[in-house]
Image (spheres, grey):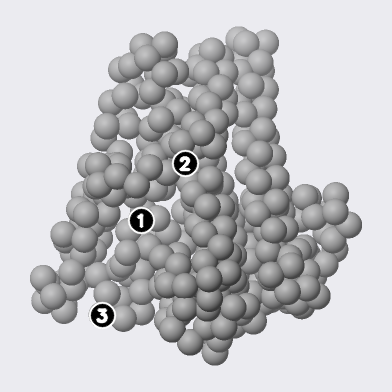
Amino acid sequence: MVPTDLILASVVLFLALGVDRLVGDPRSPYHPVALLGRFIGWWGKPALYPLILQRIAGILFWIVTVSLFTLPFFLYGSYAPWLVYLAGAPLLIKCCFAWRSLEEHALEVVAALKSGVDAGRDQVKLMVSRDTSFLDPEHIRSAAYESVTENLTDSIVSPLFYFAVLSPFGAGLCGAAIFRAANTMDAMLGYRDERIRLGWWSARMDDILNYIPARVTVFFLIAYFLTKGTGGRAWEVMRRDGKKRPGFNGGIVMAAMAGGCGIRFEKPGVYTIGNGYQSLEKGGGAVISAVRAVTLAFAATAAGTLILLAWLIHSTGI
């Protein structure tokens, strides 16, 4: 890795953010993640396999899916001339993360609620897998903002994290692609229902890949809330409620967000996170602001680290 490659990676990272803000997440059946989803849907049916073979099938198809999705990213990153790379790499990374669309989905739920609770239930159903048929307006908002908060890690920080971490090894695009494939498989198969055996490996790998990024997300959230005077509260709620949600990644991010914003996330009958000093109708906008701040701060830190590393390599002649 030469210093100019690291500087190029830092520029590409910010160009990718710009592309996201300009075009969002086009809803096309030919979007790479849509194609990925259809491939997972093709093999991800438990009924296709004997019960005893479902875990093995899940592992083998996980490897195949990650490999197929990552291959174009690998070829482009390995063989594209630098100017071609600069033009296309932001678009490829954009396929692996979603920032603007997260905000849009949440705002669409808020707008739908103005037309009535049934409209809100129908709209939030597009964001979450839970039964929305009985949710009241506050729980509808909770489901929407929970999804935005969880996806701050899954859909923004994690893919950008792996792009930045693997860029010094010339594999930044591959890192983002591997995570996106793994996270999509977890989103489609990682449930405790008839998919539990087939999706077991996908769920475990998603937990592993998100472990460090989730804690990086919490760090940036608390740092942001310190500037708002609520960092201590974010830390306190994260310590108290971070394990209430199933899994060991999403809960700490949601708890830090709830604490810092002074809101409450609640999935009826499953968990309640946060103190709820203000309703989500009033405080939901603070979630969007925090997501924007953390996204920009993390991207700036990642790009700055790549530039610093480039300078160190140039200075020391490594």
Residue 194, numbered circle: 3
Q: Can you say whether 28 is above or below 300 in the image? A: below
Circle 2 Cα neighbour tier, 10 Å, few/some/many (<14 / 14–19 / ≥20): some
Residue 156 visible somewhere in the drawing: yes
Q: State which tag comes first along the sequence, 1 or 2.
A: 2
* Residue at image point 42% right, 11% down: 83
Would residue 165 be found to the left or right of residue 197 on screen? right
Amino acid type, callout 2: Gly
- Does residue 210 sit above or below 76 in this rendering? below
Residue 172, quarter of the rendered image: top left
Q: Which mark is residue 24?
A: 2
Disc 1 secondary structure class:
helix
What numbered label is drawn on residue 172?
A: none
* Callout 3 crowding tier (Cα within 10 Å): few <14, some 14–19, many ≥20: few
Q: From the image, tell me which residue sits under label 1.
A: 184
x then y, percent, for residue 61: 21, 56
Three-letter amino acid code at disc 3? Glu
